[in-house]
Image: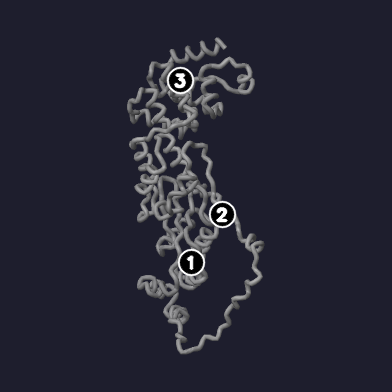
Amino acid sequence: MTGRDFYKIEVNKELSAERMRSLVFFYRPLIGNDAMALYLYFFLNGTTSGFKELNPLLQKLNISVDAFERDCRKLNEFMLLKTLRKENRYVFFVNEPLTRREFVEDDVLVRCFILNAGGDTYRAILSEVTEPEHYDDYENISSVLPANQLENWTDDNESYLKRPVTRRSYDFGTLFDINYFLKGMTTNLFPQRFRTESNLKEIARMADLYNVSNDKMRFYITKVCDLKGDTFDLKQLRYLCSNGNGEETEATDPYNVPNVQFLMKLQDGKKVTETDKYILNKLSSEYELSLPVINALLEYIMKRYDNTIVPSTVYSYANNLHRNDIKTAEEAIKWLNGSTDKSYKKQRKDIIATYDESSNPEFDEERYREIMNRRNRK
């Protein structure tokens, strides 16, 4: 672990007063003050919205990477923390401490406690965790709230209690409606801890690329959520989406349809190859092109290059579309066709045409001359 690694915190429970007592009296002698401080920091800060670099956290806690790793190991040993790692990314799942009663029933934890804090300390704390006394033979003389307390309650009073239910809404600029999708997914099938903004954005992006319906995506989600292993497999989701049979989507805007569906129409209904699917995914994820812009680019390439998609050519155009921040199909078509519309050029005078050699390691002299001739004609 290094300070340049990234971390994310997932907290799914609240710390009750009873569990806090157990943490202080039973766990603290086992894990030490430093590890307990780290645990409380994780708990009080709650779930993070995404991955963050570790260095700023270490500065806030005023500890070294080695100390941080040591404290995490202590928390892992006593199941207060579950740590997952993928390359240089760490996810910390914060678990509740056992209650005091649960703790004393765990043979291993009790023996560890006695070894660290001593038997006398254990007995002293144990005396506070006894069975509650029973008062069955006592009479209940507690006062009850009189029923007439709300006699004067009116509709106007009731209006103060009517508060609109606010749910977080997402807008990823995708054809797939992620908000509608979430309404149909229970937390038992798709736990809240997996509903990070990055995961939801990827779900919407996959649906747009491969034309996945709401119902089909819900089915896929149940396949990639491993509740036992506490993991969400995005790689498997991409595989399921790319190998599924997309449904036809009707749209008033011919360019605002899933990319696979659009490409199939350009190919007279022929199945999209895995290579082409890879290209579509790269245009969306790496070049960050919107769905309509990708479709406009596909149409241009297919017409201009004899129904052939050459990766280096596509990436070269994609790099320019991304660099010039082109967001709509109309802008993309005008740019790709070298529009002479003066008003458009005035609005987009920052747009330039360059040949991106980085996407094609072998310099294509013919392609270079073609671009230079087109630029000179302008």
Q: Which kind of residue does numbered mark 1 sit on?
A: Gly
Residue placed under numbered mark 3 in the picture? 300
Measured as percent of width and height from the top left, residue 364 is found at 43, 16
Per the model, the C-alpha gap separating discs 2 and 3 is 46 Å
Of the two numbered discs 2 and 3 on the same chain, state the one appearing first in sequence.
Answer: 2
Of the two numbered discs 3 and 1 on the same chain, state the one appearing first in sequence.
Answer: 1
Which residue shows up at 41% across the image and 42% down it?
Answer: 214
Q: In front here: 55 or 205?
A: 205
**Is label 2 in a helix, a strand or a loop?**
loop
Which residue shows up at 46% across the image and 48% down it?
Answer: 182
Q: Which one is in front in this view, the residue at disc 2 or the one at disc 1? A: 2
Residue placed under numbered mark 2 in the picture? 165
Q: Which one is in front in this view, the residue at disc 3 or the one at disc 1? A: 3
Q: Which kind of residue does numbered mark 3 sit on?
A: Tyr
Measured as percent of width and height from the top left, residue 132 is found at 45, 82
Mark 2: give few (<14), some (14-19) or many (20+) Cα within 10 Å. few
Q: Quadrant of residue 210?
A: top left
